[in-house]
Image (spheres, helix red, strand yellow):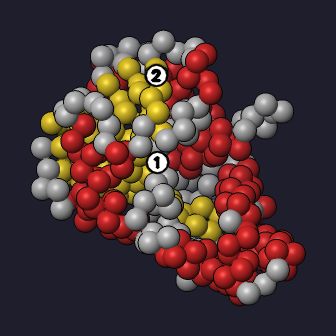
Amino acid sequence: MGCKCGKYLDDDRVPDSPDNPQPNNIGGEHIELIDRFSIPNESQDTTLSKMLHCVHRFIWQGNFSSPVEERLKAGNARVLNVRCGDGAWLLDNALQYQSSNFFGCDVIVPMLQHNVSQLNSSFLQANILDGFRYDKNTFDFVYLQFGSYSYTENEWKEKVIKELVRVCKPGGWIEIMDCENKFYNEHETTKRLGNAYRLYLESKCINPLISSRFEELLRGTNQINNIQRKEKICILGDKGGKAGKYLLQDIVTTWQSSRVVISESMGITIDEYNKLIQAFTNEVNKFKTSIKFLRVYGQKA
């Protein structure tokens, strides 16, 4: 399946999408926006996860799509970042909206929790599957990122979505950002490895295409209104500029982390699997293979 991509923003080369057409004449305010969310040059102490945060922020030209900015600027808003990782998204927003308060949760809390420069941010070791110790109706904005590979379909329905809704205030917003687990304009090696990874997820009872059901799951709670979905298609690899480079690196890292199990399921050696990964990289760079990111968000009644 192919995709039609439009003009690029700056040299970081994020493709156009139907919900975000790019102007023919870039100038003034638009240039300032691009500069504000540009992807920085990599430094020695910059982790891949932090660079990916900058990539995602650039792709979307912002850290969230929910209409909560005015609430964050007004102050005293409470924001929960589920699966916060090393806190890049949380700390970026905490710095920008210093009158509001940001709370990050993950199974493993980041080391920086003991030396957080933003006084309006904190981290809690917690697994959403166990339920958070926060009271119901606590947060003005609840943001979950990249959980599609972490929870089974039943966990999404019976635990994850319900807990996001429980801790969100009436009138507050819930947003889920993720990536489709499929490629556009894919070729032989990409199809082979992509199918192998999807089978690996299914062996763990994880629906690799769960992102297509996010709206349905939110709607099924009968508590979320104004549900919207936005999408961005991004070219991987060299032809996708800085963004494409780091997105491809992230996929390779993910696939390499499961190389023992996946290579066994494919009936090949790890050395053969590694050669397939290299062939995949070459193929992506040649054919402008792309992936789709999505944000689904809605307001609690």
Q: In the image, is residue 34 above or below residue 111? A: below
Disc 1 vs disc 2: which is toward the camera? 2
Q: Residues within 10 Å of mark 2 (few under 14, many from 20)?
A: many
Q: Quadrant of the C terminus?
A: top left
Q: Is residue 280 visible?
A: yes
Task: State the image quarter where residue 97 is shown.
Answer: top left
Amino acid type indicated by mark 1: Gln
Q: Which residue is mark 2?
A: 122
179 versus 188 height, above or below: above
Q: Is residue 70 above or below residue 130?
A: above
Image vertical order of residue 61 relative to residue 290, above or below: above
Q: Which residue is mark 1?
A: 145
In percent of width and height, residue 37 lies at: 59, 36
Q: For the point 44% across and 72% down, which residue is it? A: 205
39 or 223: nearer the viewer: 223
State left or right for residue 188 relative to residue 71: right
Residue at 27 percent across and 46 percent down: it is: 163
- State the residue in front, 255 or 101: 255
At 63% across and 80% down in the image, what residue appears? 196
Spot occupied by residue 64 in the image (x, y as percentages of width and height): 42, 41
Q: Residue at x 68, y 65 (%)?
A: 258
Left or right side of 81 for 238: right
Residue 98 found in image quarter: top left
Q: Position of residue 84 (x, y in %)?
A: 50, 38
How far apart are the two marked residues, 1 and 2, measured between alpha carbons? Answer: 17 Å
The answer, for residue 64, to whether it is visible in the render is no
Instruction: Choose the circle earlier in sequence order: 1 or 2.
Output: 2
Q: Amino acid at mark 2?
A: Ser
Quadrant of the frame with the N terminus: bottom right
Residue placed most toward the observer, 13 or 205: 205
